[in-house]
Amino acid sequence: MKYKYQFSLILFVAFLFSAPAYSQENTDLEMIYKIKTEGIRNSQIQDLAYNLTDLMGPRLSGSTNLRRARQWTADKFTEWGLSNVKIDTYGEFGRGWDVKKSYIAMKDPYYAPLIGYPKAWTDGTGGLINSEVILLDIQSEADFEKYKGTLNGKVIMLPTTLSTSPAFEPEARRLTEEDLSNRKEVSIGGGGARYSPAQLQQMRDQRALDQKVNDFLLEEGIALRISGTRGNFGTVFHTRAGSYSTAKNKTIPEMEIALEHFGRIERLLKNGQTVTVDAEIEVEWLDDDYKGYNVLAEIPGTDKTLKPELVLLGAHLDSWHAGTGANDNAAGVVVMMEAIRILKTLGVQPKRTIRIALWGEEEQGLYGSRGYVQKYVADRQTFDKKGEWDKISAYYNVDNGSGKIRGIYLEGNDQLVPIFEKWFEPFHEMGAKTITRRNTGSTDHVAFDAVGVPGFQFIQDPIDYGRGYHTNMDLYERMQQGDMTQAAIIVAAMVYNTAQRDQKLPRKPWDK
């Protein structure tokens, strides 16, 4: 037994010296202190948030306001002394679209202003319209016949399946220790298909009928379609009706109104009352530039060998159009701008080049980040590597509102656990300590992870993000600026550590 014990001990010691020394990660605590101090004492979060929301306004993809926001952020980077500042095209996006005027009110059986907004990329009404509202009952194509020739110039509604519900749960919440612990669990195996084959077919049939209804209404020449939208207490979750496609296909003028207001009109009509509305939508199509753009800027690396390598941080600059895109995603942009401002103000001399990227057109399908990857990193179809594929150590993203950072998703990369656990130690008292191997999706880090480049999204407190993003109430007031200060400090530290590390962060094995 004695010799067996000694042999086991020798193997253990040999393993310690042969394994990658991830647990020996160096953390420059003096620099972490400086980052915390600058971020707390001289925070620019409030000013940046005001400029990106109240001053720039909504930043719909391709809109005039997004163009203004791109220029404003580029100018700010230049003012801070960042290098290689540019508004960089990634390729074609499509048509721009601005709302110039929007109005809707019920006139009969009594006057009532309605909370409503045009759907994105819808055509205008061509002036003020006053019309009776017709509630259509269309269950199949056969129902078209009873309305044919009767809808020209009318305002129409289709019954909604949406409903309001009492707000039994708190409007805002922070992640509990139990929530964070659950985030660390990784499930193996599937829970079965999300939808049965019959349900999938039903969904396909409904989409096909919806398209036929839309074509029918366009042929009939309706003046306006009113749609209900999910949300309570006047919150309007907005979507799109038309297309930014350069094909310039005609669309039905359409407005989304608060579900409570939609429900009132629907009930009046079902009870035989005549309802009329006044409405007007005036829009401007922008056909002078169909390209999409990202805003880029850098703190150049200083190490002769490592300077060509890159550490990226970013967030998407575009938003939807009824609010000002405060939590989705001015908050992420502000956090990343503040993080790089902190590093620049402290005069850091990073070994690797630090590059910030503010992405365009994320809301329509990650156009900006995917376009960047396609242009500089790897071909998304063939996965052939391009110039930056071997140079990027990591990409860090913020796009889940303005809540505190509580940890980070590693996208399944086990090698990063001891590294990031060490890097997060100085922020445990700030509530950030959860390192999970889990994946998370639906935002710009996905574009990098998809081609084998480490891309990360942070775990954040949800606050009221899920009830406010993509709505008319995604405004400055909903931003948690103290939490954003914490987030900017952590991002700055993560970027600094990545830039100073002797080697690039270890990658997952990747097979194109």
Image (tube, rainbow, N blue to C red):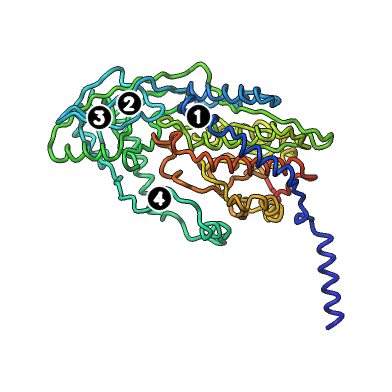
Instruction: Determine the secondary structure under disc 4.
Output: helix
Q: Which comes before the other along the chain, label 3 or label 4? A: 3
User: At x 53% / y 34%, what residue is drawn?
Assistant: 362
Mark 3: amino acid = Pro
Q: Name the residue under label 4.
A: 200
Position of the N terminus by quadrant? bottom right
Instruction: Determine the secondary structure under disc 2.
Output: loop
Q: Picture coordinates of residue 2 (x, y %)? A: 85, 82
How far apart are the two marked residues, 2 and 1, measured between alpha carbons? Answer: 32 Å
Q: Name the residue under label 3.
A: 113
Q: Picture coordinates of residue 142 (x, y %)? A: 23, 39
How far apart are the two marked residues, 2 and 4, measured between alpha carbons? Answer: 30 Å
How far apart are the two marked residues, 3 and 2, measured between alpha carbons? Answer: 19 Å
Of the two numbered discs 3 and 2 in the rendering, the one whose residue sits closer to the viewer: 3
Q: Picture coordinates of residue 87 (x, y %)? A: 62, 23
Instruction: Determine the secondary structure under disc 3.
Output: strand
Mark 4: amino acid = Leu
Q: Residues within 10 Å of mark 2 (few under 14, many from 20)?
A: many
How far apart are the two marked residues, 1 and 3, measured between alpha carbons? Answer: 29 Å
Of the two numbered discs 3 and 4 in the rendering, the one whose residue sits closer to the viewer: 3
Mark 3 touching mark 4, by CB under 8 A?
no
Q: Mark 1 points at which residue?
A: 50
Viewer-nearest residue: 385 or 56 = 56
- Tell me, yes or no, if residue 448 can be seen here: yes
Of the two numbered discs 1 and 3 in the rendering, the one whose residue sits closer to the viewer: 1
Q: Residues within 10 Å of mark 4 (few under 14, many from 20)?
A: few
Position of the C terminus by quadrant? top right
Please, is residue 438 above or below residue 299 in the view? Answer: below
The image quarter in which residue 81 lies:
top right
Q: Which comes before the other along the chain, label 2 or label 1? A: 1
